[in-house]
Image: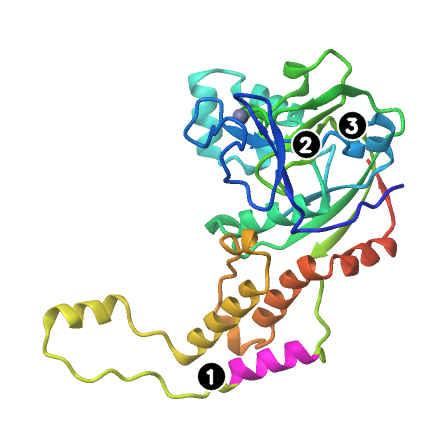
Amino acid sequence: MVERSIDFERRRYMRCQTCSHEWEVAVGDEPCPECGADGTSEHYPTFWVRPHDPVHDDDTVRDTYWYHSSTHAVWPDKDFDPTAQLTDVCRQRMEYSRPGAVERWAADQKAKALHVGTYEAAIENMLRRMNRQSDAASQFYLHRVRLRPDCVIEPGIHKELRSLMGDVQLSDECAPGVEVYRYVNVHEDQSSVSLAVEISAVGSVQSIPIPLAVDADDPELRAATARLVSAAARPPVVLPETDDPLEQMLRRYHPPATPLASEAGALLQEASDRLPPRLRDDFSVGFDEAGFSTDSSVYPAKLIGLQRLIADPQAAIDTFSAQPWRSV
Ligand SMILES: [Zn+2]
């Protein structure tokens, strides 16, 4: 099996959809150097896969480790019941408007393709999801996937289809029997190849919780925790009295941050500054001020753990090697 080299700052590969020129870039927003087409053009330049990317070869696809990040500890799960997430009211509404709708919806959900890609794409996907309210505090898992050696692969590497954003059924895109569909990822680890796969193509999976745990006596963790503890002991910021009603209202709705919250913000900023610039906008970790007194190291451990997934991916790879493979 092949473990690809991991590099979050790899140069990207572009293809102009006006004149077909292809070129490499450090960041993705350049106009086409041949014809000048840019993001405003109808046929704008887009991320594309390198002509010599090894995953053009089917056997390489089968022999490569693929990754997926998820809030599910067990993934993919053949016994997954999509209707478990529906409320009774929601079920009744669906059934009321179209009898049998819940069953058909569940079948559609189960027929959706799974998505796997590079390690970088899986981590970037997690950061994007953490940046959304609903997954800000979720526990994530990284899954390493081995495809079945006899899985059927659609020829070629394709554009990322609009419907691929989570909702594709391979039978809509490919000949019957195809289990794996290669596409260029334009959102995560841009210009890498991701796969939409049927669950039947997945041979076995290893799973680890991410970020990895940080040792309690890790020097970086101890220093960051000490900064928070010392900030928590500082008196709150007291603003001078004011008679201005507008100012009074503003302070009521936006009270000044506590020294503890300010220090947590400073730690977040420092961790973010150490990431590749491309990833900084999506790096957000909510600080639970109320939970701080229970365990003062939870927040800094999460920041350090996340940052190390990017700075030291080998630690995660090494953790996988001690994990059993689960047949799917
Ligand atoms: Zn062009």
Snapshot quadrant of residue 187 = top right
Q: Nearer the viewer, residue 42 or 294?
A: 42
Which stretch appears magenta? Answer: 219-229
Whether residue 243 is situated above or below residue 2 in the rendered picture: below
Q: Can residue 319 be seen in this view?
A: yes
In which quadrant of the rendered view does residue 255 lie?
Answer: bottom left
Residue at position x 73%, y 21% in the image: 156
The residue under the point 10% across, 71% down is 245
Which residue lies under the disc numbered 3?
56
Helix, strand or loop under label 3: helix
**Residue 252: percent from left, percent from top:** 23, 70
Q: Which of marks 3 and 2 is nearer the N terminus?
A: 2
Q: What element carries label 1?
A: helix
Q: For the residue carrying disc 1, how many other residues have a C-alpha within 10 Å: few (<14), some (14-19), or many (20+)?
A: some
Q: Where is residue 89 in the image (x, y as percent from the top left)?
A: 44, 33
- 65, 51: nearer the viewer: 51
Q: In which quarter of the image is the C terminus?
A: top right
- Whole-angstrom CA distance, mark 2 to mark 1, is 48 Å
| Numbered tag placed on residue 49 in the rendering | 2
Q: Earlier in the sequence, mark 3 or mark 1?
A: 3
- Relative depth, front residue between 293 and 285: 285
Q: Select label 3 or label 1 by which is in front.
A: 3
